Amino acid sequence: MMDDWNLRPARDLGLSPADRLKSLSREQGLVGLALNAAWRRSVRGYLAAAHRFRVMGRENLPAEPPFVLVANHASHLDALALAAALRGPAARRAHAMAAGDLFFAGPAVSAFAAYAINALPVWRGRSRRGDLDTMRARLVEDRLAYILFPEGTRSRDGAMAPFQPGLGMLVAGTDIPVVPCWLEGARDAWPAQSATPRPFCPLSLTIGPPHRFPDAANDKAGWQSVATTMQAAVRRLAP
């Protein structure tokens, strides 16, 4: 029976508290799990009360991780809404990919992003291939759910920008489901130009059938093919 156990040290063992917050290898621990659970309940309550949040197509979500959610991106509410749609192990293991220069700029905001939102940092213009390799390995080995916005930044006018190939680097050549999503109303509820959300603006999420890319080449052409396919899948969900 002992052969069934596969014990390993925590991925973030030995890191200082400050480095742990910004690490792609960060693991939650009991405190992180409790804080994240409380945050999820608060966010669900807020979205329901202030934005009449609706989810369509929840049956398209895989039964359990690993999988990746991708969506259009126009608001800071986007990651919160996608996380709020998840339940069970997927909700507990969900990590939003967040801009490191914005959400991990200092100790206080880093702690909030890490322990409440359970975000992992993506450093725009500074990410290395090794960072994506770490994210790809964790997605499979730790059975995580990633929330990703392949446009790379929030839309200022509501138009969806082309998807970047980083998504393909995570899933090309694997059977990991990639689930397309469309958020409607997020830009009105919290536009990029506003410092705070606007209550009473309705928000809805449409979840489409998952795609898999086991035959996609794990190279530049394969990565771009994945990004292009998922961009079209997300766009098809728009009303």
Image (cartoon, grey):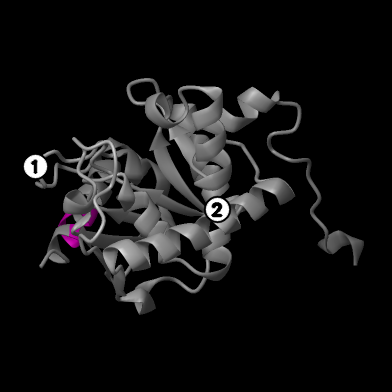
Residue at 29% in and 41% down: 196
- Cα distance between the residues tagged 2 and 1: 35 Å
Residue 214 visible in the shown view: no
Instruction: Please state the horizontal and vertical placement of residue 139, each as a whole percent of the image.
Output: 52, 50
Residue at 28% in and 47% down: 197
Q: Number of callouts in the render?
A: 2
Instruction: Please state the horizontal and vertical placement of residue 44, each as a whole percent of the image.
Output: 43, 64
User: Which dot marks residue 157?
Assistant: 1
Three-letter residue code for mark 1: Asp
* Magenta span of residues: 230-234
Residue 72 visible in the shown view: yes
Q: Quadrant of residue 55?
A: bottom left
Question: Is disc 2 placed on a helix, strand or loop?
Answer: helix
Would residue 211 appear left or right of 232 to someone viewing this image?
right
Would residue 125 be counted in the magenta stretch?
Answer: no
Residue at 30% in and 76% down: 57
